[in-house]
Amino acid sequence: MKALILAAGLGKRLGLKDLPKPMYEINGKPILEHNILLLKKHNIKDIFINLHYKPDVIKDYFGDGKKWGVNIQYSYEEELQGTSGAVKKIETSLDKESFFVIYGDNYTEIDLTDMINFHKNNNAIATVGVFDPEKSLNSRIAGGIVTIDQNNNLVSFIEGSRNKIKGYVNAGVYILEHKVLDFIPTDSPSDFGNDIFPQFLIKGFSVKAYVTKSFVIAIDTQDALDEASKVIKEGRI
């Protein structure tokens, strides 16, 4: 099984000038390194990383991934392609099987093996990792709002509305079937939350929500970084 880590973010809200956002350190390691180690822990070793801002900082640090026991390939985007556009760009490198997409600026200890089993057992075109903000250690929640039914079917996926609508929060971890690529445009940037998942719901495809109880935080502000570091150091995850 392969994975794409989305690492092309600019990190403007963090005020980063010399570092891509996923390279900011938490507990002595870049956020991106935590995500690579999470994938390796669950025996996912073929990893793609998309790049945009200061790509050499990431490439020089991780190289081909051998130091971490994984195989890393890079996909440079001269212009940002969005979360789903980034996947479309590496289409020819993906096998005809399910694969992971992980937001490289999120920190989580989500159980990827359990999520894989959940995905396979439900025969969904996509599975979205979500968490309950009311039960999260993170008081600064970031991410789109996901509403689900009693069978964990995804009912709605709305980006940027977490202060207006109650529901689960997108954890930034997806498992996708290869046929998802057929619905991603080739001629323009696109995002899963804004473009692809809503399309699946309209078409009646099965999109499942995997509810994780693990700690999840989006590293998009200095406060979020400080909080994540504190929680990790205190062993509260």
Image (cartoon, rainbow, N blue to C red):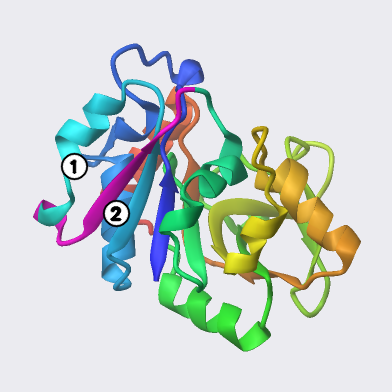
The answer to whether mark 2 and mark 1 are in CB contact below 8 A is: yes
**Residue shown at 51% from the left, 74% from the top:** 115
The disc at residue 24 is none
Residue 155 lies left or right of residue 220; in this view the side is right
Characterize the local packing of mark 1: few (<14), some (14-19) or many (20 or more) Cα atoms within 10 angstroms. Answer: some
Check disc 1 and give the amino acid type. Phe
The mark closer to the camera, 2 or 1, is 1
The residue lying toward the viewer, choosing from 104 and 74, is 74
Quarter residue 189 falls in: top right
The x and y percentages for residue 213 are 53, 66
| For residue 23, side relative to residue 158 (left or right) | left
Q: Mark 2 points at which residue?
A: 36
Which residue is the site of mark 1? 62
Residue 74 visible? The answer is yes
Q: How far apart are marks 2 and 1 (CA)?
A: 10 Å
> Vertical placement of 234 versus 52: above or below?
below
- Residue at the outermost bottom position: 121
Q: Tell me which residue sits at (67%, 38%) in the image.
A: 190
Identified by mark 2, the residue type is Ile
The percent position of residue 129, horizontal first and vertical second, equals 59, 62
Relative placement, left or right, of 198 versus 107 is right
Identify the residue at horizontal 36%, vertical 35% (top origin): 22
Residue 177 at x, y percent in the picture: 59, 69
Residue 156: tell me if it is visible. no
Residues shaded magenta: 67-78
Residue 170's place in the image compared with 230, above or below, is: below
The residue nearer to you, when weighing 77 against 137, is 77
